[in-house]
Amino acid sequence: MSDAEKDRSMQMQKQMLAEHYERLEGAREAGEPVVYTFVPGNLTELIRSFGALPVLPEINALQSAMRGKSKGYIAAAEREGHSEDVCSYVKCDVGMLKGGNIGPTGTKLPKPDLLLLSYTGCYTFMKWFELLREEYGCPTVFLHVPYQGDGRQTPEQRAYTVRQIRKELIPALEKVSGRRYDEDRLRESLALSAKAEDDLVAVLQSAKAAPSPIDAYFGAVYYVGPIFSAFRGTPEGVAYYRALREEVEERAALGQGPSTPSGRLDRQKYRLVVEGPPNWTHFREFWKMFSDEGAVVVASTYSKVGGTYDFGFRHDPADPLGTLADYCSGCYTNLNLPERVEMLVRYAREYSADGFLIHSVKSCNSFSAGQLTILREVEKRTGIPGGFLESDLVDARYFSPANLKNRLESYFQMLEARRAGIAS
Amino acid sequence: MKCFVGIDLGSTTTKAVVLDEEGRTLGRGITNSRSNYDLAAEISRTEAFVSARFALLRREVERAAGSAVLDRLLAAFRLEQTLVQLERLRAALEEEGEKGAPAGARPALSRTLSAIFDRLVSEEENRFEAPSPSERSDFFRDAAGSAFSRLSEEVAPGNGVSVELLAGLYDKCIVKVENEPVELGFREHIGGALRRVGDSPEVRAAVARATDAELDVAGSVGTGYGRARLPFPKEQIRSEILCHGLGAHALFPGTRTVLDIGGQDTKAIQVDPSGIVTSFQMNDRCAAGCGRYLGYIADEMKMGLHELAPLALASRRPVRITSTCTVFAGAELRERLSLGEKREDILAGLHRAVILRAMSLLARSGGVENEFTFTGGVARNGAAVAALEGLVAENYGQRRLNISPDSIYTGALGAALFALRAAA
């Protein structure tokens, strides 16, 4: 199709994803238990240390949307009685379930043996798993991760999360897997996580260069795919991030930009910071609206929903359960508004951004509430002009191309005019 | 003389502005938008140059012969333009009638069309001979349409032709005719106009000079909803947000906030002291509460668009209308009427609903901190203006509100100013 798919890393991860879905299809026969859990706060190392496989419903939803399947799923969920205002990830998942639970790559998804809700700020996740529990009648564990209301995790909160992992989650995993908790195995896995995380951070921070060798939003959602889903703490994950880092460093050394829907973007007119998830139904069309204008995203918050590694956090094998608690607490969705603002301000400065955009999605209250305050605050603190776009995650009805294009063009022209104004 | 052209291709109307090298407006033109965007742009441009040449003429003739002569000449010029268009419409209708009507019905149809068009032409000539200040649309399609339908009802039954057949033919032909090129320029019709007003040597000489005056287009910029379809290179296309900002600044240099309500979108724009946009918000995903909403309401109430505001302003007790969804508002309107609410009170409520939606965009763009300019077609609606004044005062305190009688040209003016700046 286009240049973007020619990247080695992209082929590699496509392959990894396909294999994971195939493995899930055969999980029952292979005797591998299946745990459904969400991206933010996913405890992949722990799950896999019991020989279990994770299924991430939001990944299924977004992958289905990228393959043009979400429209039918959402319609099916609405026929089931879900209103238009319900999170479109939920409806996409429910619709997929009602249609036989065929995953995005065409393989059948197994039923869960356990629903693990690691609660990191999204209330909808709780409702979502209530629906799935009703459907499957399987055991459910609710790991309550305290919200970082004061901008940090207190020692008491940390101990509280660790206690739940030890007293509730581990026994539940032991029960469904029939295996004893093996801390050494978990430590090994966490060490692999940290390795991959180092490489991921190097990749994300490569965007500080000009031209940036990556697009830290549209490109980065591919880059974070393996680590946010089933591959954190696995040798395949480590190999992927090593290869990705080499690929990116090679581009950086040659002064090349990333592959985009408009070809390789070497000449970068605008460096942007983006807040909010992307739209998945028109992913490439949306990206192209940026790349056609020579805009590259140098930092994004969405690429941190499954873990904020660029400010120093690494999974620590020396303290296996404590580090899992730290990880959950630090997920982007669990941060308060001042922390989110601070993060964006740092990105704007450290990545020498020209502009700052919010893509607000109708479906997601966790992300969208407070975004206008964030916009004003970041503008005030950085002096960088902000822009606001709206569409949705996987509901194509809320993606209005002409309108988005109009706003983006206006925004870029505004940056241009201001640049000219400041120069004169 | 060098001049600069700005064209604003809106969803309802297409506007053009011609500026001289000093940035002074030489002429303006407007036409209804249509499926042939290039033609709409060309007609508005032609009209702007007609108005520019009349302005040149006015400078000379006013001194020598007084302005009455010129007004007469302009009316004659408009008549010439109208007659050309009527002739084309007649030809198209006859051709379509030949093709579409059963052989036996053709003579009657032909007789009817002749009778209607003879009346149409003589009405136009009478209007020129004895001008009356009657309200009618500036656009050929609307003015001719209403006259044609009135005359059909008078003439058709006597000739045994159905009014519906004529209406169907008309709809088909007007679309065809208005999407085909037609010469409406100054040079083409000024001679005929001169003959009609009796040409004195002074006027004839002035007309010759105005016709020969060189107006060299040194730069053009396009904007508006259809801007991507304009036959201009990319660097000559500007977002209407930037153009409205700069245009409003040119009209009222103290402007810091601009509200533009057009046919299908509403924009709240903040500008800096030099007219450069610093922040903006626009409606997304849905065009509820835009100009078209008022058009729909006018249709529902069987009123002309320009009749809405005077009636709404007569309201003593505006009704609270909760919906700006065009379809819901239509239902609400009918329900209120059936409950015996007064038309003026309902209309006042509807205007307020439009402005309430704009208030939300204004707040999101940064509020109204200083001098404020209202542009777009809806700024010509007195009831909308009154609602806006009230709500701005209520929310932000007393602010100076600017509305130019030429506010509909604000975007085109901004575009022309960008063309001028680019050449500097």
Image (cartoon, grey):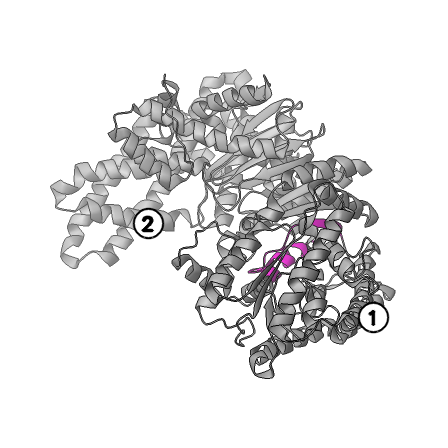
Q: Is residue A207 in view?
A: yes
Residue B215 coordinates in the image, percent (x, y): 62, 36
Type of amino acid at the residue the image marks with label 1: Glu
Q: CA distance from mark 1 to mark 2?
A: 65 Å
Residue on which the image places disc 1: A246
Q: Which of A397/A119 is in front? A: A119
Q: Quadrant of residue A255?
A: bottom right
- The magenta segment is A269-293
Residue on which the image places disc 2: B173
Crowding near pointer 2: few (<14 within 10 Å), some, many (20+)?
many
**Residue located 26% across and 51% down the image:** B94
Residue A279 coordinates in the image, percent (x, y): 59, 56
**Residue located 67% across and 65% down the image:** A170
Q: Is residue A191 left or right of residue A329?
A: right
Q: Mark 1 vs mark 2: tell me if same chain.
A: no
Quarter the C terminus of chain B occupies? top right
Quarter the N terminus of chain B occupies? top right
Q: Is residue A218 in view?
A: no
Type of amino acid at the residue the image marks with label 2: Cys
- Would you say residue A365 sits in the magenta stretch? no
Q: Residue furthest right?
A: A253
Q: Which of B117/B175 is in front? A: B175
Q: Which of A296/A217 is in front? A: A217
Residue A50 coordinates in the image, percent (x, y): 68, 73
Chain identifier of the residue bearing label 2 in the image: B
Total number of numbered labels?
2
Chain identifier of the residue bearing label 1 in the image: A
Q: Quadrant of residue B123?
A: top left
